[in-house]
Image (tube, helix red, strand yellow):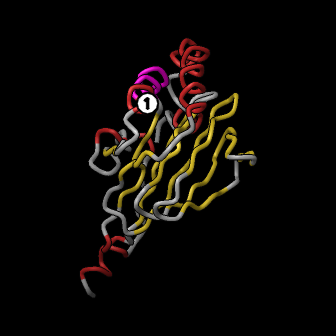
Amino acid sequence: MAAEDSQRSGIRIYRAAEAPDLTQTDFGEKSDFGDHTELKDVAVALAASARTASRLLVRQTPGEGGFSLVYLFFKPNFPLFRHKHESDCLYVVISGAALMGNQTLRAGDCFFVPALAPYSYTAGPEGIEVLEVRHNVDSFTTIFASNPPSRLRDANAAIEANADAWQQITIGPLLRANAGPN
């Protein structure tokens, strides 16, 4: 049996309770603001206010199958800046809702974003949990794209309106449900 086949034989369980915070890994820790430095201060303020939950649930080597699965929980009314990644990504909404353009995404909806295609959305009143599926990607960078001035105003308004409520929410529904014994 080839070494690659032996890495793929059998079932492997990945426990959400054991998944590292994404920011504590080298998988998606990089941000590139490029020429969009006006976003940086607001993005840092959003992150500090909302403390968005992110976990690296699965990270396989190519020999194991090459899949990665990231969990993200954006708190209620969180405005995600327009950005892109250097690799394709498939998203699955697992709870809550978000407004993306003129589309409302709800639990069970999926969306695919090809490499370098910019996108953004705003979490609904209960927040949104998404799973990000990538294949054969060793790491990714969040590359900030052009955002209209209204998006910066909306982000600052969201911080003002939601900061206290965001502080009360410490964990998303999936991780809260998974906090029990294995």
* Mark 1 residue element: helix
Q: Position of residue 90 (x, y in %)?
A: 55, 60
Q: Position of residue 100 (x, y in %)?
A: 67, 46
**Residue in the picture at 39% in, 72% down:** 65
The residue sitting at the left extreme is 3
**Residue in the picture at 40% in, 49% down:** 143
Q: Position of residue 134 (x, y in %)?
A: 45, 62
| Residue stretch in magenta | 44-51
Q: What secondary structure do most residues of the magenta stretch adopt?
A: helix
* Front residue (pair 51, 95): 51
Quarter of the figure with residue 86? bottom left
> Magenta includes 42?
no
Query: Which residue is under mark 1?
Result: 43
* Front residue (pair 46, 139): 46
Question: Against 157, is 103 above or below?
Answer: below
In the image, is 35 to the left or to the right of 176?
left
- Amino acid at circle 1: Ala
Quarter of the figure with residue 173? top right
